[in-house]
Image: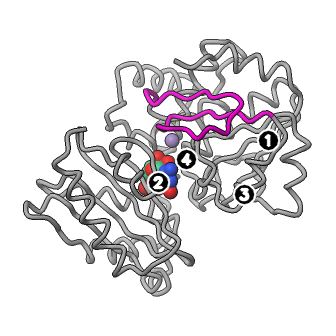
Amino acid sequence: MINFDQLKQVISENESFLITTHVNPDADALGSEIALYLILRELGKNTRIINYSETPYNLVFLDKLGVIEIYDEIKHNSVFNSTDVVIAVDFNRSDRVVSMKKALVESTAFKLCIDHHLEPEFIWDYVFIDSIYSSCGEIIYDFIKKTAIVTLTYELAYPLYAAIMTDTGSFRFERTTQELHLIAAEMLRLGVIPGEVFDKIYDQSKFGKFKLLGRALNSMKLYGDDLSVSYMVLTRNDFLETGGLESDTDGVVNFALSVENVKIGILFVELSEGFKVSFRSKGSVDVNKLAAEFGGGGHVNASGARFHKGTLSELIPQVLNKAFQYTTKEG
Ligand code: 5GP
Ligand code: MN
């Protein structure tokens, strides 16, 4: 249970806020940041959004006001100390902000975390975390409703709808409840058009994204005695040759899980420095614990980890072997 009254109190007792989110932000991260920004602005608070990553091209429309700033050590480190409060949205572990970690951890401001992931790090002064929520967008919605801190308007509902829609896989993942559909219904009543939001996020992609997806699908292999692990690999070459971007890999891992009998789907992505591995699973197969074995985390059915050294040929067998063990573990 999240103590929304406490969140409201911290907001009312402070004047300046810095909102931030994780590397490669998704629509939940950005939609929640924007909604929170609008709430704080309406309350007359001095608010900035500073993110480690650039906003992916298909999500720029969420930042209608153009207020998101991209982290620059020289320009922004002082802001982490001069602000009253830092609000972390959609992540709870400082390694999720890569080289901005130092500024966050060493910030002298109150550190708040609003999130729906498991196992937070112990760096926060206040935590507003509950993994029962489908998305951070749903947490912000609940905050507005339970505290009446502001009125829910179309301007707020729009980014929050984008947040909820994307984090529920367009209303199909486990946390898609009756209550969540009622929340969506309320947002539609306020004027949100589902097809419009979906089109902007998923149907305005650059051509290279599909070429990259083709490479990923082509690389798909099955692993394990019972072929219950499916994996795909994207190398630097795939990015260079297709023109696809790292943000274009969002959602690609789900294809690995769409194969019959597969319990764990994995996507290996070679970054300019190191590797990112995404895990997806069905039912009680716990890929949060699997990712944690490699220093990552996330949710029971969706998680990820980053690797800073080694090669793909060392990494892949090691991860597959561990993943296969998890296909037989009860969560
Ligand atoms: P994705 O594979 O879509 O990037 O991430 C799936 C989930 O795993 C997200 O909820 C995200 O927060 C979490 N996740 C992804 N990468 C990492 C990571 O390196 N560390 C942690 N702690 N969580 C991650
Ligand atoms: Mn989220």
Under mark 4, the amino acid is Ala
Give the residue number, with chain letter if any, for mark 1.
18
Dot 2 or dot 3: first in sequence order is 3
The nearer-to-camera label among 2 and 1 is: 2
Label 1, residues with CA under 10 Å away: few <14, some 14-19, many ≥20: many
Give the labeled residue for mark 4. 27
Magenta stretch containing residue 112, yes or no?
yes
Q: In this view, does 66 lie above or below 215?
A: above
Question: Could you tell me which residue is drawn at 51 percent across and 44 percent down?
Answer: 197
Can you say whether 226 is above or below 183 in the image? below
Q: Is mark 3 on a helix, strand or loop?
A: helix
| Sequence-first tag of 1 and 3 | 1
Under circle 4, the secondary element is: helix
Please name the amino acid that badge 1 sits on: Leu
Q: Which of marks 1 and 4 is nearer the N terminus?
A: 1
Q: Which amino acid does label 2 sit on?
A: Gly
Give the magenta range.
110-133
Q: How crowded is mark 2: few (under 14 residues within 10 Å), some or many (20 or more)?
A: many
**In this view, the mark in front (1 or 3):** 3
Q: Earlier in the sequence, mark 4 or mark 2?
A: 4
Q: Does the residue labelled 2 lie within 8 Å of ligand 1?
A: yes
Q: Which residue is drawn at 57% across and 43% down?
A: 91
Residue beneath label 3, please? 100
**Quick one: label 4, few (<14), some, or many (20+) residues within 10 Å?**
many
Tag 3 or tag 4, which sits nearer the N-term? Answer: 4
Which residue position is annotated with label 2? 296
Q: In this view, does 258 lie to the left or right of 216?
A: left
For image coordinates 50% across by 27% down, the residue present is: 130
Label 2 to label 1: alpha-carbon separation: 25 Å
